[in-house]
Structures are given as structure tokens and as C-alpha cells.
Amino acid sequence: MTDTESTTTTSATATPHRARRSRRRSGLLSIRRSRTATAGAVMLVILALTAVFAPQLATHEPFRQDLRARLAPPSWDVRTPNSHVLGTDQLGRDVLSRVIYGTRISLLVGVSVVLLAGTLGTLLGLVAGFLGGRVDTILMRIVDVFLAFPFLLLAIIFMAMLGASLGNIILVLAITGWVEYARVVRSQVLSVRELEYVTAAKALGARSLVIMLKHVLPNVFASVIVIASLQLGTVIIAEASLTFLGLGIPPSIPTWGSMLASGREYFVLAWWLPTFPGLAIVLTVLAVNFLGDWLRDVFDPTL
């Protein structure tokens, strides 16, 4: 090989790496320019740290009851011993501590569901789009059956059959949430599989599994990330809704949905009971949506 050919080969190999580094740098610069994306990222980092260090941040034991201090209003004077910054509920439990511990449950459910649903939906969409034929027809008819029912209604049906528990709500939301990944990935794979490098890999005798995972999946993974970021907020709302209806996580576990359910009966007497967990849900979903919109703008070349 001549020096010219060697230089050309090295340059061609390095170009994709430089392009990826350039995209990463431009993405970091764009999030710094976007105030909403920056705010969303900061809020999510704070929520993640709150979930990790909940025992250290909680001012009281979230399960401890004190009927003498029931329905105590918020006390902003931190110099008062055993003060309750966000008040107490009908059993005298500290609202702030329960909101902090509820962050753990909401993020655990949201991240677990996104990982399970994203993995299942991406793999099924990848197989359906790449293989086509009867496999594609069967998988897409299953998707149509799931889409025939509203997301929350289908989750309510499954939870009514399985019972309320943390594991069941993660499983149910993952089962009902994979279809969006499958549809998007399948539609993109249909076009990616016709590209020249995929055809060349087939001609060289590469196995279908290797082609799907090594050549096709990286080209559709950006859409998966965008869907996952936007679905996280939907899952958090769905978990709170099911728990609010008594079909989600048991009341013994402090969650934002259970706090809303128990606080609605005391809204006139104790406005802080449903207000603060409701604000926690709103801020979390807003942060996720802000970051999701930024990811969509970064990964969508048409924007």
C-alpha cells in the first residue's frame, strides 16, 4: 500500500469519529444555550440526588405517626424543634419526608419501565422491520391490538387482575408501553435495511443477527432515546394515577399518588396535603419533557 492510499484510508476511518465528536460537542453547546433544557437537566439531577440521599435529606421518619401533630400546617421556622416544613398529614406524618421518599418510587418505576419497555419494543421492532414477511405481519397485528385500548385503561385492567404491588405496576406499565418503540423502530428499519452498507454486509455473508445489532440498531437508537425521555414523564403520571385509584403501589409505601389520594379528603382543612405531592409530579414531568424536547431537536436532522 502506498503512502497516499494509507493516508486516505486513515482519513476515511477517522472522519466518522470526528463527526461523532463534533455532534457531541454541538449537543453540549445546544443544551447550554437552551434555558429550558438546562432547567430540565438541573431539576432531574436534583431529583436523582434526592432519591439517592433520601434518608439523609428527610427531616423525619416518613412512617412515624404522631396524632398529636396531625394536620399541622407548614412551619417555615427551622429554629423550632421537630418543625414540619411542609406540614403533617391526617396521621401526623411529615409531608416533606414522605415527598422525598416518594421521589425514590417515582424515579424507580419510571426508569425501570422505560428500560424494560424500550428494550422489548426496540428488539421486536428491529426483528419485524428487518425480517419482514410473516414475522412483521404477526408482530404488527399484536401492536394493533394493544393500540386498540387506551394506555391507562389497559394498565387498569392488568392491575385489577394482578393486584397492587411495586413489581406488578412496573411489569404492567412495561407491557403496555412497548408498542410505541416497536412502531417507530420498525418504520426506520424498513428504510435502513435497504442502504448500501447493509446490502454489502448481507453479500459478504454476515448473519442477520450481527447485521441487526451492529449495522441497523445504531442508526435507529437515537429515536429510541428520544421516545424513552418523553415516555418517562408519562410513566410517572401513570403510576401516580393508578396509585391514586388504589390499583398501584400499596398505601403503606410513601408515593406521590397515594399522598394525593389520601389528601383529597382533607383539601379544605389541609390544602398542603395534595398540593406538595402534586407540585412534585408537575415539576418532574416538566423537567423530563424539557429534556425530551431538547433531545428530539438534537437527534432530528429535519429540525
Image (cartoon, grey):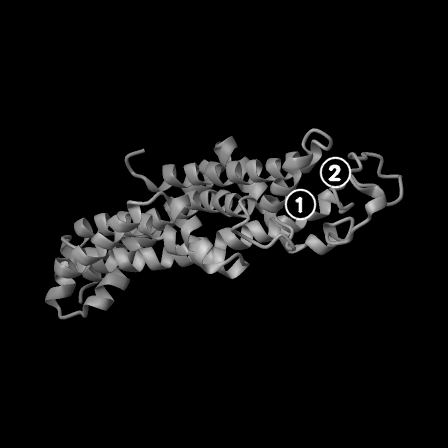
The three-letter code of the residue at mark 2 reads Leu
The three-letter code of the residue at mark 1 reads Val
Q: In this orientation, which residue lies closer to the viewer: 170 or 37?
A: 170
Q: Secondary structure at mark 1?
A: helix
x and y, in percent, of residue 116 in the image: 41, 59
Q: Residue at x 32, y 39 (%)?
A: 300
Q: In which quadrant is the N terminus drawn?
A: bottom left
Q: Residue at x 26, y 55 (%)?
A: 125
Q: Residue at x 67, y 32 (%)?
A: 267
Q: Earlier in the sequence, mark 2 or mark 1?
A: 2
**Tally of numbered discs:** 2
Q: Tell me: 106 left or right of 171.
A: right
Looking at the rendered structure, which numbered label has been put on residue 99?
Answer: 1
Q: Residue at x 26, y 50 (%)?
A: 145
Q: Residue furthest top?
A: 268
Asked if residue 300 shows in the view, the reply is yes
The quadrant in which residue 4 appears is: bottom left
Q: In which quadrant is the C terminus drawn?
A: top left
Q: Tell me: 249 left or right of 34.
A: right
* Looking at the image, residue 191 lies above or below residue 85: below
Q: Are marks 2 and 1 in contact (CB under 8 Å)?
A: yes
x and y, in percent, of residue 188 in the image: 23, 48
